Amino acid sequence: MANELPSSSPYVVVGAGIHGLSTAYHLAKELRTRGLGSGADVLVLDKSSPGSGASGIACGVVRNNYFQPAMSELMQACVEVWESDPAAYHYNPVGYIALGASVQEPDLTAVYERQQRIGYRSELILGADAVDAHMRSLFPDWRARGVTVCLHEHQGGFAFNLDSVEGLVGKCRSESVTILSGVEVQELELGADDAVTAVRTSDGRIEIGEQLVLAPGPWAKRFWAMLGLPMQIDIRTPSGEVVRDQPMWTYWNLQEGEIAVDPTMFATADGGPPPVIHLDTDAPLSTDGGDLVTDELWGIYFKRDRHGVQGGASPLVVGPDVELDPYPQTTNVDPGFADMWCAALSHALGRFEGCRPLYRDARSGGVGAFTADNFPVFDHLKPNVYAILDSNHGYKMIGVGREVAKVLVGEHSSLLYPFRFERFATGDLHPVSNSPYPWS
Ligand SMILES: Cc1cc2nc3c(=O)[nH]c(=O)nc-3n(C[C@H](O)[C@H](O)[C@H](O)COP(=O)(O)OP(=O)(O)OC[C@H]3O[C@@H](n4cnc5c(N)ncnc54)[C@H](O)[C@@H]3O)c2cc1C
């Protein structure tokens, strides 16, 4: 049955993922506390249902290991939101450990030093023996090789994806925000002043009173097209050189999986919940049977989950186009992924030796849409259209919605400013790290 749609709404938010819901909730609070309105002025539309996009499939890792100052500062604000209500967000503040090979020492040291400056609680351990001792104090069976740097973040951790989305849905409802499932936005009506006057949906037309917020996750490119924005862009690099005709959007597939074990077998030496672990190393990786998997830099991440241990490895490029629906499409998965990930778990911790038969391809992994520089675009793309296009960084970025809400009521956000679209033309790009991942 078609939804009963209002003919107009002051604020329409497209997408009920982490960003759309966080924006709707924080906007409702801003409107109420400033005496400008209430959550009844905010309407969220989702073509499926809350959490049916990337937010519902995310591994859920919350970390601040970002080489880019702007990402790090924004993440600090996001962790503040996670910490504000761990119960509602199903947030597990277990911390996060990044381990790297010598090539990553300068980057992780820079990240650590910035974290100390901004007051993000973390610890840096340098040198193979010291890293080994730190990890063995947590996990006596730690045995990874080729690791000379360890950044142990004592904040961050992970959250349960669909549960945290539900937590946000509850918060939206408590502020009288309306969330409509099964309403697909198909067209945007542009007025003479380039503002969007209405959205045309599968269930009817809604006029925009004040602002339209787009938070479509992996469907970013579709909305980019609706706004008439260029699919190829010129990028001015910080040196002044202009690289022409770069694709604005590229899809990557995030490879993730899990092993079915009693989750409590992955605990710290004192029986506590383990931090999320991200391991990069250049030590040769072999299966438990002794077959070489790779002798190049490799990396994995893993965390304790409800029904086992879950994690992933480097994503793979899919290309400029992909069929996203039904989401998540799992396309372009390396056939050797399960072997590699299980071998890597065993390389890290003796307790995972022989875990390959326990691997299962559960509800894990999926496609994300990445921008031309792999960093988010958070910006007004039309006078009354704010877009939250996070380049697949963003389940952890629950605080972006809080910042966007401030912008929607007329404030400036210095945390969001570095993510404006204009950066590609002005050369104000984010620095690039030595990490093999597109999101570090
Ligand atoms: C496998 C995987 C693992 C990940 N792991 C992590 C992680 O551990 N930590 C982390 O921080 N990030 C992670 N990410 C990234 C993170 O999940 C995303 O960046 C984030 O969830 C995006 O949130 P969103 O609200 O923008 O989009 P989504 O959660 O995708 O929500 C967008 C919503 O928009 C709706 N929609 C789309 N088009 C329309 C339309 N035309 N009309 C109406 N509604 C529409 C969709 O149905 C969807 O519900 C991961 C991503 C993937 C794919």
Image (cartoon, grey):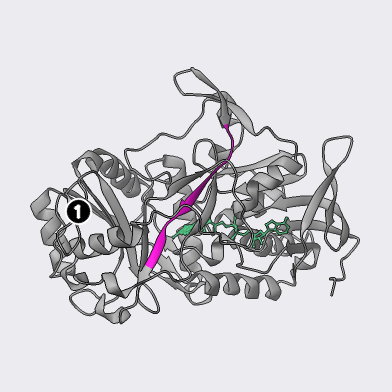
The amino acid type found where label 1 is placed reads Leu
In the image, taking residue 369 as reference, residue 40 lies left or right, namely right
Q: Quadrant of the C terminus?
A: top left
Residue at position x 18%, y 68% in the image: 138
Residue identifier under label 1: 285
> In which quadrant of the rendered view does residue 274 lie?
bottom left
> In the image, which residues are magenta?
247-257
Q: Nearer the viewer, residue 51 or 411?
A: 51
Ligand 1, seen in the image, is in the quarter at bottom right
Q: Nearer the viewer, residue 27 or 363?
A: 363
Q: Quadrant of the N terminus?
A: bottom right
Dot 1 falls on a residue whose secondary structure is: strand
> In which quadrant of the rendered view does residue 417 lie?
top right
Q: Position of residue 294 (x, y in %)?
A: 23, 48
Q: Main secondary structure of the magenta part?
A: strand
Residue at position x 19%, y 42% in the image: 102
Q: How many marks?
A: 1
Viewer can see residue 392? yes
Q: Position of residue 189 (x, y in %)?
A: 86, 45
Q: Position of residue 250 (x, y in %)?
A: 54, 41
